[in-house]
Each structure stands twice: as structure tokens, then as C-alpha cells.
Image: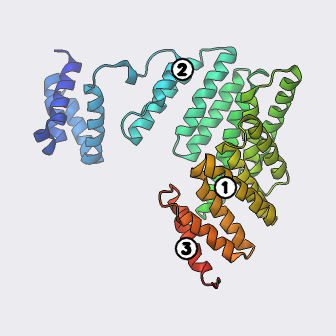
Amino acid sequence: MTTTIRVRFLTARCLHTTSTLKTFNPTDLLLRISSSLNVRNVAKTVVEYCRRVGWLRMSLLIGSTSLIAAAPTHEWWRVVGDDVDRLIARAEQSFGGEMLGREYRDMALRRAVQVAERMEGEEKIEALSKIFTRLANLQADLYETERVCREGVQLMQEAGPTTKNRHLVEGMRTQFAVTWLNQDRARERRNLSPGTSHTHQAVRLLRDAACVLETSAKENLNRGTPSRKLLLQLANTLQSLGRQFQYDDAERSLQSALLIYQHIYGLAHHTTINVLDDMGCLYNRQGDYDRAISCYRRAAELGEAHAPWLVSAILRNLGSTLVAMNDKSGARDTFLVICTFSNSPCKVLVLHAMACLDVLFEFVTV
């Protein structure tokens, strides 16, 4: 009997038997495995480490690892091979709990990065774009996301992007800039010290990316070879730039993004509806309440038919605008509509609407 089979057999016997699981003792498991493998000294060291770290935490880790070891030797969970698309597909699979699944996907994507670094030309940049986009979305911490985006931009720049795939690099720059903006926004929400604000740097990065993408899009149109991916990346960058309502070019950016999304997707798409909602927020911030209400109502009307999961947030914004206009009756009716969404995923919005109703009813006389 080989070492691997012995470890799997003993672990599975301890973990999968009901009677044994009730009185599961990690020390006994380690000692039994060590006795079989003649590595008792190593096991004693591990046991001592477990005592310092905590048995519950280590039991969960050992149990998860043992289940993987006891699993059938299928290739789907092994992070090997030199096919980038195959490695990315494995990373997309969720395995284990939240922490274990994230670590597994990160490991698979890091293996894909090693493979992609051996590629050359356009194929390398496309592979790096796929990998680092997923790596950035995988991170739970904004500062880790920033590090991943910075690494992705650097590797893609070193690969020497061409006009054809320049939009991929600018797409990673856009994600990098949005991460900076999210960091500043998170500090504001938590009332933390501002520290080093990256807002101006992020906006400058978004403007540079939008300029490059717009130039590439015009060149493609002049050649008669428009690129759908390039236009979508341009619209995404413009929308991110337009969400910075304090800048003068926010309105123009959102209008351009709306035109592109409307041309590609039409109005009956959640992305287009999101831009309409953003335009409503912009006009609300500028004090142009009539145009804001018009955008919100148009977005809510389209959302009811094509993106119902967005309606709660849109109506919340509409209700807040009506309150700012001192239209208490209209705001009350809007918040009451939100409260009828009992199965809405936006529970926080519903509670916020109900709290606003308590205040509004003090001023509204029926």
C-alpha cells in the first residue's frame, strides 16, 4: 500500500464514519497517520503547532485538506497543464467553502499567469487580460485588487500591445482607476482619515484611457472595421468617468456611454438602464431636479420590463429627489411602491424607504 493510499484511507475512515466524527480527535488522527508513515516526530511537531493556533481552526483546515486527498483522482481539481483557457475554466469552478474556493481559484489563475508569460504577441496580451480581470474580481480586499491591477498593467505593457489589442490594456487601467476610487469612497463611508487620495489620479487615468480608446475606435470606423469589444470598453471607461459627478466632463461622458450602449444593446438592457440611473444622479447633484426625475422614471419604466432587480435602487433615488423638491406626497407614493417589493433583494433599500415614510407622514396631511 502506497503512502498516498494510506493517508487517504486513514483520513477518510476518521472523517466519514459517523461514530468517529462525533468524537473526532485531531491528535489521534495525526498520530495514527504518523504511525503508519513512520514520521511520528513530524506529527508531534504539528500537534504542538495545532495547540498554539487552535484546534477548531486546524481541524477545519485538516478536514478540508483530507477530503481533497481522499477524493477520486479526477483531473478537474488538479491545477496543472499549459492550456490557459483550460486553467481559467478550472478557476471558474467553485470548490469548497468561500475561503477554500477563493484560494483554489487564485492558485489556478496564478498557474495560468505562469503559462501566459511564456507566450508572445497578441495571444499573450489577450491571455493576461482574461487572467488579471478574474484575479482582480476575486480579491476581497481593495488594496489587494490594486496590487493585482498594477501587476496586470505592468505585464501587459511589457508584452508590447498593438493598436488591435490596446483596448485590453486600457480596460485594465480602467479597473485600476475604479479600484482607487472605491478605496477613497470606502474611507469616506467609514469616516476614516482621508490619507492619500487617489481620486484626481484615477480621473486622469480614466481620461487618458478614454482618449486612447476613442482614437482607436475612430480609426477602426474609418477603416470600416468597427470593434464591438473596443466600443464596449470605451463605454465602460466613459461611464466610470461620468460617475465622478464633481467634474465638468461627467455629463458628456455619461451621454457618450449611453449612446454606445444604446447602439449595441438597445434601451432594453440593464447596462443602458444603469447609465440612465447615473445620469439621474448627476442631474440631482447639479440641482436640475426635473431632468433627474425624467431619467429616473425612464430607467424605472425600462427596468420593470427588462431589469426588475434594478427598480428598487432607481425608485429610492427618485424618492430622494422628490424629497429634495419638497414633493412629500410624490415621495411617499414612491417609497410605498418600494415597500411592496417584499421579495426584493434590496432589503436595505426597503428599510430605508420605510424609515423615510415615518418622517414624511409627519409632514403630509391626507
Dot 3 surroundings within 10 Å: few (below 14), some, or many (20 or more)? Answer: few
Q: Which mark is residue 85?
A: 2
Q: Nearer the viewer, mark 1 or mark 2?
A: 1
Above or below, 329 against 175 in this view is below
Res 300 label: 1
Hey, what amino acid is under mark 3?
Answer: Ala
Question: What's the CA distance linking mark 2 and mark 3?
Answer: 49 Å
CB atoms of marks 2 and 3 within 8 Å = no
Q: Is residue 296 above or below residue 128?
A: below
Which label sits on residue 275? Answer: none
Question: The residue tagged with tag 1: helix, strand or loop?
Answer: helix
Q: In terms of image quadrants, where is residue 324? A: bottom right
Q: In the rendered structure, which disc, 2 or 3, sits on the residue that comes first in sequence?
A: 2
Write the residue at 55% across / 34% down. Answer: 135
Q: Is residue 193 visible?
A: no
Label 3 secondary element: helix
- Residue type at the position of mark 2: Asp
- Image quadrant containing the N terminus: top left
Q: Residue placed at 67% from the left, 47% from the top?
A: 180
Residue 140 at x, y percent in the picture: 51, 45
Residue carrying label 3: 355
For the point 38% across and 24% down, which residue is it?
77
Left or right of 156 on screen, residue 33:
left
Image position of 139 (left or right of 275):
left
Is residue 213 something that shows in the picture? yes
- Vertical order, 160 against 204 (above or below): above
